[in-house]
Image (cartoon, helix red, strand yellow):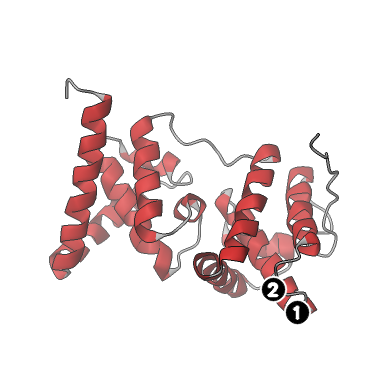
Amino acid sequence: MVETRQYSPAPDLLPQTNHQIQLALGIVADRFRLSKDLPTERKINSILVRDTAYHILSARGLEVLEISSLLCTNPEAIGIGLNRFYKRRQSDFRFKSLADEIDKQIELIWPIDPVIKNPTTQQVLNLAQETYSIPISAIRGKTRSAMVTEPRVVTMYLLRKAGFSLKEIGFTLGKRNHSTIISGLKKINKLKEADPEFTEKLSGLEDKIDFFREKQNPAL
């Protein structure tokens, strides 16, 4: 029988706000308190809790200034914290396992806005995640860190090549406006002109998406 756990808000992170956010941050705080695999030193643990909170809120479309206001944090610290979170998630298996568990639990009470219900969209997102070892939540999130920029604009490019409109791509990638998508596509052109290796990698990704679409729609 699966144990049902009641999660309380995290008062040290967020005194008063939306109940859904309180529950989500309560899960973050509780999971770190219960974890036996991560450092127990208070300062290290508090940094990991806060960085994970940044990720949870950013992945659900909150802007940096909104997160800053909610958590009483300097906006610059949020960008630094998100970078630290993604780097640690890539390099520390134990932390990745815990972060994945937290993501799954919070998805049950506060799901990320669903992407367009199209298998090609899911394939593009999965391909970007696998190629760059960056979680889909980061690609769809609001952070502008260098390590997320390339996978995000590549995702924009692949979705555009697959026939999605600027509006659809913007919705898929965290409700971004069409001017942001246009800017991202321009970055792809500059990268292709400047880096032959990038162009080759991009061509390989296009081939994989074309192959997937042909399997889904043999008539294409």
Find numbered disc 2 in the image and state the secondary structure of the residue it sits on.
helix
Give the quarter of the image for residue 34: bottom right
Residue at 38% across, 29% down: 118
Residue 25 place in picture, x, y as percent: 74, 54
Residue under label 1: 43
Residue 146 vertical position relative to residue 136 in the rendered view, above or below:
below
* Mark 1 crowd level (few <14, some 14–19, many ≥20, 10 Å Cα): few
Q: Could you say where residue 29 lies in the image, as x and y percent from the top left? A: 77, 60
Q: Residue furthest front?
A: 1
- Image coordinates of residue 139 in percent, x first then y, are 44, 54
Amino acid carrying label 2: it is Ile
Residue at (42, 59) in percent of width and height:
133
Q: Amino acid at mark 1?
A: Lys
Query: Could you say which quadrant of the image residue 74 lies in?
Result: bottom right
Is residue 190 at all visible to an observer of this figure? no
The local secondary structure at tag 1 comes to helix
Q: Position of residue 130 (x, y in %)?
A: 38, 53
The span from disc 1 to disc 2 (Cα, nearest Å) is 6 Å
